Amino acid sequence: QVQLVESGGGLAQAGGSLRLSCTASGGTISDDAMAWFRQAPGKDPKFVATITWNGGTTYYAESVKGRFTISRDNAKNTVYLLMNSLTPEDTGVYYCAATPGRYGGAYLNEYAYWGQGTQVTVSS
């Protein structure tokens, strides 16, 4: 069974950048669509971005479009989320997720495998 581990979270100042990584073990994600979700304190998880199995197509939530970039390196079994121009509203726990299909969407129930999350805190 695929296991996902996120890293790269931490504290950033508003306007700064962070790059999150999600590395899979126990199997390959090269045929899986991948996504990032985030959960702000006291709120439900929300979609951030998704990428198709080969990296050919990406899709973003409106709130992060133009600031965040999702990418993947299938040789390394890893997906990334580069976050620029961070704002305090980007604060939350960021989760990566994988779906057995090659194309994923913005809904939590499309994804079968989840990481444990990494905390991102943006100070003003």
Image (cartoon, rainbow, N blue to C red):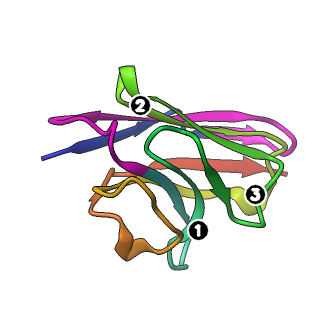
Q: Which residue is mark 3?
A: 64
Q: Which residue is mark 1?
A: 40
Instruction: Give me the residue at 73% from left, 49% from top.
Output: 122
Instruction: Give me the residue at 43% from left, 44% from top.
Output: 53
Tell me which numbered mark, 1 or 2, is placed earlier along the sequence. 1
> In this orientation, which residue lies closer to the viewer: 5 or 100?
100
The image position of residue 78, as x and y in percent, is 41, 31
Q: CA distance from mark 1 to mark 2?
A: 24 Å
Which quadrant would residue 76 be assigned to in this image? top left
Q: Is residue 116 visible?
A: yes
Left or right of residue 39, residue 122 in this image: right
The image position of residue 103, as x and y in percent, is 45, 58
Which quadrant would residue 14 be assigned to in this image? top right
Instruction: Give me the residue at 15% from left, 35% from top.
Output: 26
In the image, is residue 17 part of the stretch drawn in magenta? yes
The disc label shown at residue 78, or none: 2
**Mark 3 residue crowding within 10 angstroms, few (<14) / some (14–19) / many (20+):** some
Q: Is residue 96 above or below residue 61?
A: above
The disc label shown at residue 60, or none: none
User: Range of the magenta residues?
Assistant: 11-33
Left or right of residue 28, residue 92 in this image: right
Which residue type does callout 2 highlight? Thr
Tell me which numbered mark, 2 or 3, is placed earlier along the sequence. 3
Q: CA distance from mark 2 to mark 3?
A: 21 Å
**Mark 1 residue crowding within 10 angstroms, few (<14) / some (14–19) / many (20+):** some
Which residue type does callout 1 highlight? Ala
Mark 1 vs mark 2, foreground winner is: 2
Q: Is residue 72 above or below residue 107?
A: above
Which residue type does callout 3 highlight? Val
Which quadrant would residue 62 be assigned to in this image? bottom right
The image position of residue 41, as x and y in percent, is 56, 71
> In this orientation, which residue lies closer to the viewer: 111 or 94?
111
